[in-house]
Image: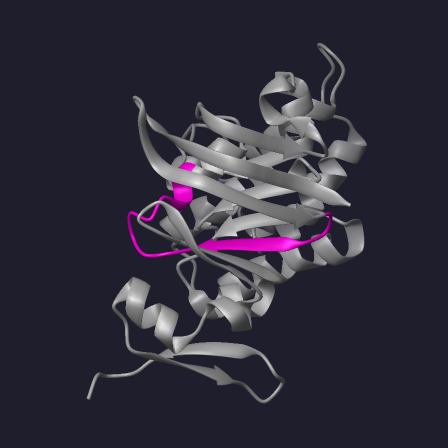
Amino acid sequence: MTALRLEKVSAGYERDPVVRDVSVSVRGGGWLAVVGPNGAGKSTLLKAMAGLLPGAGRILVDGRPVHSLSRKEKARQLGYAPQDPVLPDGLTVTDYALLGRTPHLRPLAREGAADLSVVDEVLARLDLSALAGRRLGKLSGGERQRAVLARVLAQRAGLLLLDEPTTGLDLGHAQALLELIDRLRREDGTTVVSTLHDLTFAAQYADHVLLLSDGAVVASGTPAEVLTPQALQRHYGATADVLTATRGDLVVAPVRPV
């Protein structure tokens, strides 16, 4: 089943397309990594998928145009985490994560024990339990990033749109986060679309990679098909080897030019 389909999508700001004619499908429970050099249009494309930008073409979520969804329907089906969110500094981590449960509440209803249980589980998985009562304004950059992801994961949406989810995280927390997302994908059938600067993470977690350059799709396929030394040289201007680790995972390793 196709969870997300883009058909010749163009999007941008003030009639100036940043991405052009993007077509791709993501199966239910799949993971699409959108990669590309700075300024390629990755974040713009993700905002278009979330229905936050006007544009041309069609974006279908479970067969329905994203712009036809009501605000509550969209919040139940789509969990979107921007790269640079504005956070209410006065809220605690728990209170902020509980905002992710709002789409599942009846009008004027308050969160119940089940909602608190979901949030507690997410905070534990993101190593945030010890910070549950801390105000957002007192968090470090990496802790704030994990709090944003806690709110999104607490939504339990079927489709997650994550813009650079590992920004500001150390290696261990980045791996733990991606493992949690992958667990949701495998166990609950959650569909994931993420932009990622770390190409090794993209290769190891995504089953489909979309490479953008100058707003256009220049490659689409499995990580091994897209992340080649030739493509990295051409579109990133980078010299790199693509290696196979002991367990079969791909590793993108920059090397010094000769």
Name the residue located 58 percent from the left edge and 79 percent from the top edge.
Answer: 249
Q: Is 38 inside the magenta-drawn segment?
A: yes
Q: Is residue 202 left or right of residue 97?
A: left
For residue 121, above or below residue 74: below
Q: Position of residue 18 (x, y in %)?
A: 33, 37
Q: Is residue 183 magenta?
A: no
- Relative placement, left or right, of 103 versus 17 is right
One can see residue 221 in this view: yes
Start-end of magenta stretch: 28-44
Locate residue 152: give its quadrant. Answer: top right
Colour scheme in use: one colour
Numbered marks: total? 0
Point out residue 17 in the picture as x, y percentages from the top left corner.
33, 32
Measured from the top left, where is residue 126 in percent x and y? 59, 54
Q: Quadrant of the C terminus?
A: bottom left
Residue at the spot 52% in from the left edge and 50% down from the top edge: 194
Give the vertical position of 8 relative to 175 (above or below). Answer: above
Residue 191 in percent (x, y) is at 67, 47
Residue nearest the viewer, comparing 223 with 98: 223
**Farthest top residue in view:** 108
Q: 78 and 121: which one is in front?
A: 78
Give left or right: position of 96 versus 183: left
Which one is nearer the viewer's eye here, 153 or 21? 21
On the question of residue 147 being in view, the answer is no
Q: Residue at x 31, y 23 (%)?
A: 15
In the rendered image, which quarter is residue 144 located in?
top left
Residue at the (69%, 37%) spot, across then down:
157
Report the quarter where the N terminus lies.
top right
- Between 194 and 99, the residue placed more toward the observer is 194
Indicate left or right for 253 with 66 as reference: left
